[in-house]
Amino acid sequence: MDFVISLDAVSRRYPRGVCALRDVSLDVPAGQFAAVMGATGSGKSTLLHCAAGLDRPTGGRVRLAGQDITRMREARLTRLRRDRAGFVFQSYNLLSELTVRQNVALPVRLGGPRARTVDEVLGQVGLGGLGERPVGELSGGQRQRVAVARALVTAPAVIFADEPTGALDPATGSQILGLLRTAADRDGVTVLMVTHDPAAAAWSDRLVLLREGAVADDRAAPGAAEIAERLRGVSAVAA
Ligand SMILES: Nc1ncnc2c1ncn2[C@@H]1O[C@H](COP(=O)(O)OP(=O)(O)OP(=O)(O)O)[C@@H](O)[C@H]1O
């Protein structure tokens, strides 16, 4: 089976001796929504960054969207990320002086695949009427919808989400999680999400627990029926 994300015995040791990841192996297939949890400092962000090619492991191998990125040159890796991956971070990482539409179009302006129209993805995230508004005028929940739309516009193989609901209230956070869930279910996007919040992880298919940089537990996430129920509510909101 070809996995969208594949880590084989990955380690990440920092210069002063801190070992953030120890021998982590993780395969995530197409369309799976995997959550990564663990105590602070357990290596969650390091895992996500190594999987996304934003950080280089000091040991092991990483494959992303069918390509070995372990020793891939930076320019090629940047193109691969641009073309096949979307990113949703706690801090939104949007350009607040640009409009919603301009932010969502950025990956395409930077040369990424023109896979979906801006209008289509804005409709999907429930921001159909807000395209011309500067992002600086939007609420946190609306900004995170813009980030999800920007992540979707290239029709990526994978979305990396680092605490996507960390700055949001629970109800608004649920709407964002519903959008990621739909991306996995309807568009076949693989989602790798780091979170501190068990309620957020309940939206995933699979829960990976890290302890001191190693995988301590890896199993199907509980509450599938509950997830489906919540999704129906959120889909109605986003429609
Ligand atoms: N640039 C760095 N230099 C040195 N050590 C680092 C660096 N980045 C992270 N670490 C260390 O690596 C370990 C894992 O960090 P990481 O940020 O991946 O954990 P985390 O589980 O995401 O934490 P949190 O939940 O607090 O965000 C920690 O001990 C951290 O101090």
Image (cartoon, rainbow, N blue to C red):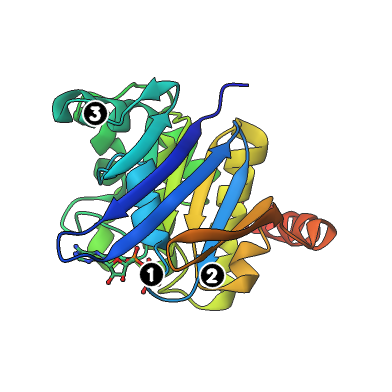
Q: Which residue is mark 2?
A: 172
The amino acid type found where label 2 is placed reads Thr
Q: Are marks 1 and 2 in contact (CB under 8 Å)?
A: yes
Does residue 129 appear in the picture of this structure?
A: no
Q: Residue 151: percent from the left, percent from the top?
A: 39, 41
* Residue indicated by mark 1: 140
How many residues crowd around disc 2 within 10 Å: few (fewer than 14), some, or many (20 or more)? some
Point 48% across, 35% down: residue: 5
Note whether 76 is above or below 186 in the view shown: above
Classed neighbour count for the residue bearing mark 3: other residues with Cα under 10 Å, few (<14), some (14–19), many (≥20): few
Q: Amino acid at mark 1?
A: Gly
Quadrant of image for the N terminus: top right
Q: Earlier in the sequence, mark 3 or mark 2?
A: 3
Tag 3 residue: 71
Which residue: 24% across, 50% down? Answer: 99
Q: CA distance from mark 3 to mark 2?
A: 39 Å
The amino acid type found where label 3 is placed reads Arg
Helix, strand or loop at label 3? It is: loop
Residue 16, percent from left and from top: 15, 66
Residue visible at 62% across and 72% down in the picture:
198
